[in-house]
């Protein structure tokens, strides 16, 4: 007997795009929710145009990024600048449990799709708006993007080396932090509605969802009056602490030693070389004071082994160590990810076979994975209109002809 997915019956109208929102709706969809993703010819999801692309695919249906974050969804194209397009959305909202959007503050209101308008259509609807800094406040109207926001929340100031400019990571950290708060908020709102019958509006600010990860920096300043700066790979509470070169081309292993016991274990694995007995390295304080020399000596040892050998030797001795893995390592060489079937192969009509990720948690009674591959652009417009909204052929053809649907 086929197991029921935990969120079967949950209906979501999804106006989100790029990373954070689509991650949330992917996880909901992978667990059985019906996700109707709203796009338009004027505003397709930006990740449809983001590299890498499948070989030979350069259109809206070839992006590996979009493919990974949009499994288990229907794609519907609606022109929201047309009043009749908004009417179609309202018909979707009438049967929806959740409306999720990541437009800038005020956009949904200008479209006539803000919470006050939607709850007239569906009084118990739950609406979640996710924006960079929230729906109100002195900076709420400023357009932004995750790469910029990670500077605003203090992350970039800490990344890099103390004698160099701050580093800006290619991916925005908070895009991968905020989804978990969104999911918790939505589950709480659904539980509240189950108990009271009331929907609600959720204003989630990605700045606030991520800034608490800088809490040690905030505490250091408020308690000690000290402004933390970039430290490269170093950590004041650990030595050695960094990534060290190993055999092979660009092969590295990360090692972190926080206690004297871990240091003793590391020394035993290395064969207790004479340099480890120097007073410069006999305590954590001394090791941190002589960290440059320590890093040099560590690198001399790690270069004699593969990254996998260093990791295995140190982990067996109780020392934290891990290979700095590449994309190839993650897909082809990581036994843990393979054992848990983290990557799932699905087949798309245009892209062909490709990998997508399962949710990072496993529910023992209702295990879930992608129900279907990512949707092609507007793939389900006709299905949603005719099979879900029960729109007749004449109305559907009229809306297509008028440019309301595509």
Image (cartoon, rainbow, N blue to C red):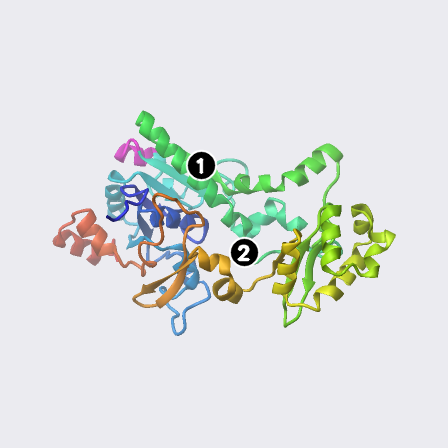
- 140 relative to 287, above or below: above
Q: In the rendered structure, which disc, 2 or 1, sits on the residue that comes first in sequence?
A: 2
Kind of element beneath mark 2: loop
Residue furthest to the right: 279
Residue 324 falls in image quadrant: bottom right
Judging by the rendered image, the residue that carries numbered circle 1 is 203
- 85 relative to 400, above or below: above
Q: Is residue 402 visible?
A: no
Q: Residue at x 52, y 50 (%)?
A: 146
How many other residues sit within 10 Å of disc 2, few (<14), some (14-19) or many (≥20)? Answer: few
Q: Residue at x 39, y 37 (%)?
A: 186
Within the magenta stretch, is there residue 121? yes
239 left or right of 6 in image: right
How many other residues sit within 10 Å of disc 1, few (<14), some (14-19) or many (≥20)? Answer: some
x, y percentage for residue 345?
A: 37, 62
Within the magenta stretch, is there residue 52? no
Kind of element beneath mark 1: strand
Magenta stretch, overall SS: helix
- 71 relative to 249, above or below: above
Give the CA distance from mark 2 to mark 1.
24 Å
x, y percentage for residue 209?
A: 52, 40
Q: Say which of 206 and 143 sits in front.
A: 206
Judging by the rendered image, the residue that carries numbered circle 2 is 171
Answer whether labels 2 and 1 touch (C-beta < 8 Å).
Answer: no
- 96 relative to 279, above or below: above
Residue 322 falls in image quadrant: bottom right
The dot on residue 276 is none
Residue furthest to the top: 196
| Callout count | 2
Q: Residue at x 50, y 49 (%)?
A: 176
Q: Which residues are magenta?
A: 116-124
């Amino acid at each position: 007997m086929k197991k029921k997915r935990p969120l079967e019956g949950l209906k979501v109208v999804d106006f989100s795009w790029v990373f954070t929102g689509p991650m949330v709706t992917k996880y909901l969809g992978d667990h059985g929710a019906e996700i109707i993703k709203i796009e338009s010819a004027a505003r397709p999801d930006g990740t449809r145009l983001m590299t890498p692309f499948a070989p030979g695919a350069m259109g809206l249906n070839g992006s590996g990024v979009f493919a990974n974050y949009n499994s288990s969804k229907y794609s519907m194209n609606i022109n929201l600048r047309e009043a009749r397009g908004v009417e179609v959305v309202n018909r979707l909202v009438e049967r929806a449990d959740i409306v999720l959007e990541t437009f800038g503050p005020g956009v949904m209101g200008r479209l006539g799709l803000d919470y006050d308008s939607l709850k007239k259509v569906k009084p118990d609807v739950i609406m979640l708006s996710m924006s960079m800094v929230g729906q109100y406040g002195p900076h709420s109207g400023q357009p932004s993007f995750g790469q910029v926001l990670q500077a605003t929340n203090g992350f970039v100031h800490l990344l890099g080396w103390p004698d160099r400019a701050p580093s800006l990571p290619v991916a925005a950290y908070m895009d991968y932090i905020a989804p978990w708060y969104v999911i918790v908020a939505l589950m709480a709102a659904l539980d509240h509605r189950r108990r009271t019958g009331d929907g609600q509006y959720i204003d989630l600010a990605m700045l606030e969802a991520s800034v608490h990860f800088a809490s040690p920096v905030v505490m250091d300043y408020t308690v000690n009056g000290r402004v933390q700066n970039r430290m490269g790979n170093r950590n004041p509470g650990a030595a050695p602490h960094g990534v060290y070169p190993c055999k092979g081309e660009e092969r590295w292993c990360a090692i972190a030693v926080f206690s004297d016991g871990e240091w003793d274990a590391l020394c035993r694995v290395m064969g207790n070389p004479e340099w480890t007995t120097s007073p410069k390295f006999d305590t954590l304080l001394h090791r941190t004071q002589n960290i440059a020399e320590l890093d040099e000596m560590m690198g001399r040892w790690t270069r004699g082994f593969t990254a996998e050998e260093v990791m295995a030797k140190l982990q067996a001795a109780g020392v934290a160590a891990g290979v700095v893995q590449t994309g190839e390592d993650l897909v082809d060489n990581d036994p843990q990810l393979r054992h848990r079937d983290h990557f799932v192969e699905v087949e798309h009509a245009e892209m062909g076979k490709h990998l997508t990720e399962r949710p990072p948690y496993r529910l023992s009674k209702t295990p879930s994975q992608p129900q279907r591959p990512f949707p092609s652009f507007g793939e389900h417009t006709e299905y949603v209109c005719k099979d879900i909204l029960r729109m007749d052929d004449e109305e559907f053809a009229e809306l297509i002809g008028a440019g309301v649907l595509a």
